[in-house]
């Protein structure tokens, strides 16, 4: 019997991303899988795009009554209720680090004999995640930072309004270019100077590429990674840039801060916007310790924890940046996930799935 992959219609508000694209669904069909796709008006891909490549469209929510051996694929956590979860599920459930409510949530799978392969815990043998939404997080983060910089130059002291979501990346690039034009004129013709830390990583390369896409010259984008930060922060280059995009992946070792209130208190400071893509304000190891909470697309910037004025410094700390460009980020993510999905028919022996199943079972064994 061919393995059935049933793509849920995600129900989390504003979530338009998908772990399966028409292209990756077609690759699975070609490899002999049956792919069922729940109809969805929210998902960035139209139902017809899946129908055209031969996937079977099924009603939204039909996963609940799907045969037990079907694999239920989605992106975000399942709706919070108490129904049993007897299938094999693949999605981000955000419970394996014992987040709030983890035990009742996990027990819904465990008591019904289900299995949860959490997307965050699909790893290589070396422990590296096989798929993450990095590149377009950095890309979108840089975009929001430019929008905020332009807003502040043109409207000092006025709170910035909601940032729109975009159908695709070219629409975002166009929007940012139009927002920047009058701000650069008002800034004596000077384009913003940017520093990206963690520039060689997934998020960092997305941020750097976005700067290129809007036509910033290579020397207006300072790219720091491990080599450049080895001497230890804080760095005056951060205060001297107009925009700082932080994209480092925080390991377990403490990192000296890249920026502090003291390092900002210099006459040469130009910095108006920090976009903390890494977004760990509650970590003791946060290398951007000048703010204390998250922001959102409707209120994209927050103040620093102590006022930094003249010019005012605002912080962007949005933890779901890829949502801003759901098509490209879904294309990227589902492409990274596909090699693992193609081995689902032998998941009892394939390392990526056996490791993920062990993670699940270990967590279940910790249930109170
Ligand atoms: N805000 C969001 O929506 C969002 C989305 C995806 C990922 N993230 C977060 O972004 C972070 C980066 O993710 P990634 O996938 O790009 O990781 P990655 O491992 O691909 O890249 C991290 C980069 O940081 C560099 N780095 C690490 N420590 C450094 C230091 N002290 N100084 C300079 N460079 C350093 C590494 O060398 C690497 O190049 C993670 O914390 C991730 O959780 C946020």
Image (cartoon, rainbow, N blue to C red):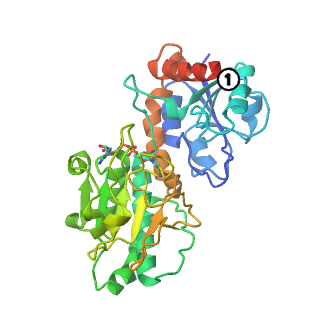
Vertical relation: 199 (above or below) 95:
below
- Looking at this view, name the residue that lies furthest to the front: 262
Residue 319 lies, in percent from the top left, at 52, 52
- Looking at this view, name the residue that lies furthest to the right: 82
Relative depth, front residue between 45 and 312: 312
Residue 327 lies, in percent from the top left, at 50, 52
Picture quarter with the C terminus = top right
Relative depth, front residue between 179 and 37: 179
Relative depth, front residue between 291 and 345: 291
SS at mark 1 in the image: loop
Q: How many labels does the image show?
A: 1
Vertical relation: 349 (above or below) 325:
above
Q: What residue is disc 1 on?
A: 367
Q: Can the viewer see residue 212?
A: no
Relative depth, front residue between 290 and 347: 290
Residue 316 lies, in percent from the top left, at 47, 62
- Residue beneath the point at 59% across and 40% down: 75
Q: How crowded is mark 1: few (under 14 residues within 10 Å), some or many (20 or more)?
A: few
Picture quarter with the N terminus = top right
Q: Can the viewer see residue 51?
A: yes
């Amino acid at each position: 019997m061919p393995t059935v992959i049933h793509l849920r219609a995600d129900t989390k508000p504003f979530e338009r991303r998908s772990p399966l694209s028409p292209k990756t669904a077609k690759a699975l069909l070609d490899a002999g899988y049956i792919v069922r796709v729940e109809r969805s008006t929210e998902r960035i891909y139209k139902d017809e795009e899946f129908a055209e490549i031969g996937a079977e469209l099924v009603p939204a929510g039909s996963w609940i009554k799907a045969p037990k051996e079907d694999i239920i694929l989605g992106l975000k956590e399942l709706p919070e209720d108490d129904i049993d979860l007897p299938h094999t599920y693949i999605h981000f459930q955000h419970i394996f680090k014992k987040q709030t409510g983890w035990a009742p949530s996990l027990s819904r799978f465990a008591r019904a004999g289900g299995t949860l392969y959490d997307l965050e815990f699909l790893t290589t043998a070396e422990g590296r995640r096989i798929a993450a939404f990095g590149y377009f997080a950095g890309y979108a983060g840089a975009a929001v930072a430019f929008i905020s910089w332009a807003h502040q130059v043109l409207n000092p002291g006025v709170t910035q309004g909601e940032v729109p979501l975009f159908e695709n990346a070219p629409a975002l690039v166009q929007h940012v270019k139009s927002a920047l034009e009058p701000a650069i004129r008002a800034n004596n013709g000077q384009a913003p100077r940017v520093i990206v830390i963690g520039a060689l990583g997934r998020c960092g390369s997305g941020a750097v590429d976005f700067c290129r896409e809007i036509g910033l010259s290579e020397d207006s984008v300072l790219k720091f990674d491990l080599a450049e930060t080895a001497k230890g922060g804080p760095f005056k280059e951060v205060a001297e840039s107009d925009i700082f995009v932080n994209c480092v992946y925080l390991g377990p070792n403490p990192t000296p801060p890249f920026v502090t209130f003291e390092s900002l208190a210099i006459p040469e400071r130009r910095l108006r916007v920090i976009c903390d893509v890494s977004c760990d304000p509650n970590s003791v190891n946060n290398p951007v310790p000048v703010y204390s909470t998250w922001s959102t697309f409707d209120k994209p910037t927050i103040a620093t924890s102590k006022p930094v004025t003249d010019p005012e410094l605002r912080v962007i700390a949005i933890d779901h940046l890829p949502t801003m460009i759901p098509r490209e980020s879904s294309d990227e993510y589902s492409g990274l996930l596909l090699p693992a999905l193609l081995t689902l028919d032998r998941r009892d022996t394939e390392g990526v799935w056996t490791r993920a199943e062990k993670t699940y079972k270990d967590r279940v064994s910790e249930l109170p």
